[in-house]
Structure formats: structure tokens, C-alpha cells
Amino acid sequence: MAEGIYVGALLVATPLLDDPNFRRSVVLILEHDEDRGTLGVVLNRPSDISVTQVLPSWDSLVTGPSVLFQGGPVQTDSALALAAVPSGEEPLGWRRLHSPTPAVARLGTVDLDAPPEILAGEITQMRIFAGYAGWSAGQLEAEIRQGAWYLVDAEPGDTFHSDPESLWRAVLRRQRNELAFVATFPDDPNMN
């Protein structure tokens, strides 16, 4: 389990968090500044909207499922893309996430206004998110203290998990402490 909030960490919603925007969500932290706040994207909310419908020129570069992901409740009319590169190179149109963890060392944001052709041979995986999650300075820390989030380390496969809807359980299950048991928490405790 991670100590403090940092770029590349995962926020995993606790079973107590029932806000529909974040229920059973896994959020990758993209920016964190104690004075300005925190920004991240929800990794496990694929939508029904295909990338072809919104950004057709990027569709061939997207890692399946080829849909927009609901990145969070803020600015849902805008898109943000994450992509992985195969090496230490920084291709044009891609900006590295500055993280202390090797799990996201090859991960960065994509300039969706750039021509997709310049990144076509440069990236290995990519997902596009509609909107993002944001917290003002101190807000996320308070939510963690209140028991809304677990803060854990990311692993390389989390961002482009092949079955996004199972990511919440998968991240919890691999923890080496009591959090592994939370993965078995029923969707509806009243049905238990």
C-alpha cells in the first residue's frame, strides 16, 4: 500500500464510497500538487460510445475495448488520452507522466490535436477518457482519512487492463494485507 499521494498511484474506492461517479472505481493519479490539488482518470469505466464515433482518426491506435472511458465527472465534454511507449524515447505529441514508480515509467498523455500518424509507430497502447476526476488542495487527503479511498501502488498492466470492469477486484486481490479480503465484498451487502 502506498504511503502518500503521488503521480502514478492508484486510488481504489472503498466499499463505503457510494457516489455513482466513483463507486468501485480505480483512479490513476496523473497530477498531484499540495497547493493546487489532484487530477486523475477512472480506469475501469468503459462507456458505450465507440472511439470511432468521437475521434475516428485515433481508433486504430486504441487498445481494446475501442470505446471512450468515463474518466471522471469533471469536463466530460473533453477528452484526455493515455499512451504507453516501448522505450525511454519521448515521441512528438506525447508527454511523460513524471512518477517515482517504474509501473508507469513508459506512460504519458497524448496531444489529441496532433496528427495520429506521428504516434502510430511510437506507442504500444492507448486509451481515451472523457472527462477526469479532480480534487482541490487537501480535498483528496481528507477523503482518504474519512475512509473513501485506498491508496495503492499501480502495476504496469493496470492502465490498459484487458477486462476493465474486473480491475477493482484485481487491484484489491493482489494487496498483501487485509485489503485483499475487500475484493470479496459483495456488490450489494443487503443481498448477502
Image: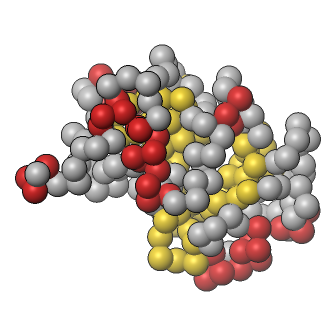
The residue lying furthest to the bottom in this view is 53
Q: Is residue 48 above or below residue 161?
A: below
The residue lying furthest to the left in this view is 190
Left or right, 150 with respect to 93, comes to: left
Q: Nearer the viewer, residue 172 or 85?
A: 172
Q: Name the residue located 72 percent from the left edge and 43 percent from the top edge.
A: 107
Left or right, 88 with respect to 73, comes to: right
Q: Is residue 38 above or below residue 83?
A: above
Can residue 80 be seen here? The reply is no
Left or right, 30 with respect to 60, comes to: left
Q: Is residue 88 above or below residue 142?
A: below
Q: Name the residue located 41 percent from the left edge and 38 percent from the top edge.
A: 173
Q: Name the residue located 31 percent from the left edge and 51 percent from the top edge.
A: 23
Q: Nearer the viewer, residue 184 or 48?
A: 184
Q: Is residue 144 above or below residue 13?
A: above
- Residue 166: x and y in percent read 44, 55
- Residue 138: x and y in percent read 40, 24
The residue lying furthest to the top in this view is 3
